[in-house]
Image: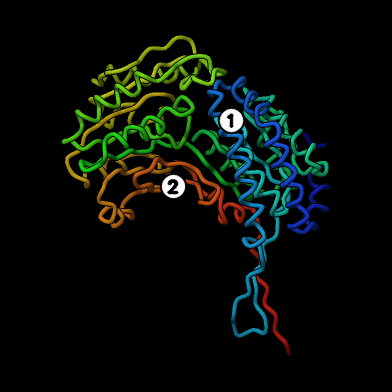
Amino acid sequence: MLSKINIANEAFGNWKKKTIAERMVLVKNLQLELEKNRNYYATLITKEMNKPITQSLAEVDKCGLLCDFYINNAAVFLETKHIKTEAVESFVTYEPLGVLLGIMPWNFPFWQVFRFAIPSIIAGNVVLVKHASNVPESAQSIENLFIKSGFPEGIYQNIAIKSDKVSEIIAHPFVKAVSLTGSEAAGSSVAAQAGKYLKKSLLELGGSNAFIVCNDANIDQTIRIAVNARMQNAGQSCIAAKRFLIHQDIFEAFTEKYKKALSELIQGDPMHPETQIGPMARIDLAEDLEKQVNQSVSMGAKIILGGQREGAFYSPTIITKVTPEMPVFKEETFGPVAVLLSFKTLDEAIALSNLSEFGLGVSIFTQNVESIKTRIPEFNEGAVFINEMVKSDPRLPFGGVKKSGYGRELAEEGIKEFVNTKTVVIQHF
């Protein structure tokens, strides 16, 4: 581990001197290599964590889009900004910090890494990545991809270590910052370690996104979005819609149509192209979800669809008669479980949406868009999507508030998270 940190630090000495254009040549090589072998990488993802193969292919393609976005925009994002003051010359530069540690999750084993590593490396940093233990082949294949693309040794390194060794890396003087995507507990621990050594941290943690459906929404179109918003990747996504808040006037109609749509999803072997719902990534994760559901049922919730587990398979599930005290409302449910509640007024819906320790994103469906736009400041979220599911996009900053973490990935904000914003003032005597 120490040797890899030393290699990274030595590599940084040369990498930071490269121009953005020089770095971008290698990023383009990586993009082309990724696209050429997309089936291979997608198969790795599906094999290791059971994502349906069509969704794994989409994940790989999205990584390519991220590369393309920064290839076309990074130079503008990082260019020196000249500011008029009383001095002869004033400007701001954006310089790399050095060696960064990324702690990455299993649910999007390529995308999560790429959105951390690509902008960081383009900015002139070098990265060490501690990936999730259940996706070791994906983890190593990403490092191999950087090597095949011509990146110098030490720019990107995979470090196969246990979680109890992370604190040693954060403490090392060569490591300047850390980015974690994962659980609230892991984020709290990493943030404490980073704070102890006065190092910057970025946390992208859990979410319990509300999906609000007003009484004037187009139900059929909203249902189509609602299926994907909850069931993509078997519901194993921090930004998945988890709490569905439906206006009382359309609650019954929405519930019946949503129940029918979920019951028609094809479950099976994730390697088959027609499969829409595969097993969850691990049996213990399915067991944890089962406990949350069963405890909520014991408190009065009602399962109207699904609720069965067979090994790592957990059937698409809808739960009603839910109250905010129940685990399926107040905790993050990381699997294919949709919680449905009704509301009378938009004020009530906003209050229910905000009644969460998480604050990653919210979706609102209505035909009265202009009215909803005036209420955007009332949502305590990192993102508000109107007539669309919450999703990440390389062009838009991504991150949350409250226990969903802090800092932003993607877009211009993301590439500037791990730079030294340096002020320069020049005066002549």
Q: Which residue is mark 1?
A: 57
- Spot occupied by residue 228 in the image (x, y as percentages of width and height): 41, 31
Residue 168 shows in the view: no
Earlier residue among tags 1 and 2: 1
In the rendered structure, which amino acid carries the disc numbered 2? Val
Quadrant of the image occupied by residue 208: top left
Tell me if 311 is positioned left or right of 381 in this view: right
Mark 2 nearby-residue class (10 Å; few <14, some 14–19, many ≥20): many
Q: Which residue is mark 2?
A: 401
Q: Residue reaching furthest top?
A: 310
Q: Residue reaching furthest bottom?
A: 429
Residue 426, numbered label? none
- Spot occupied by residue 18 in the image (x, y as percentages of width and height): 79, 56
* Figure check: 81 above or below 184: below
Label total for image: 2
- Write the residue at 59% across / 47% down: 201
- Residue sitting nearer the eye, 188 or 72: 72
- Residue sitting nearer the eye, 198 or 210: 210
Residue 269 shows in the view: yes
- Residue sitting nearer the eye, 194 or 42: 42
- Write the residue at 49% across / 35% down: 184
Quadrant of the image occupied by residue 48: top right
- Spot occupied by residue 26 in the image (x, y as percentages of width and height): 76, 47
On-image quarter of the N terminus:
top right
- Spot occupied by residue 398 in the image (x, y as percentages of width and height): 50, 47
- Judged from the image, the secondary structure of the residue bearing numbered disc 2 is strand
- Write the residue at 33% across / 49% down: 379
Tell me if 412 is positioned left or right of 321 in this view: right
* Figure check: 60 above or below 67: above
Q: Nearer the viewer, mark 1 or mark 2?
A: 1
- Judged from the image, the secondary structure of the residue bearing numbered disc 1 is helix
In the rendered structure, which amino acid carries the disc numbered 1? Leu
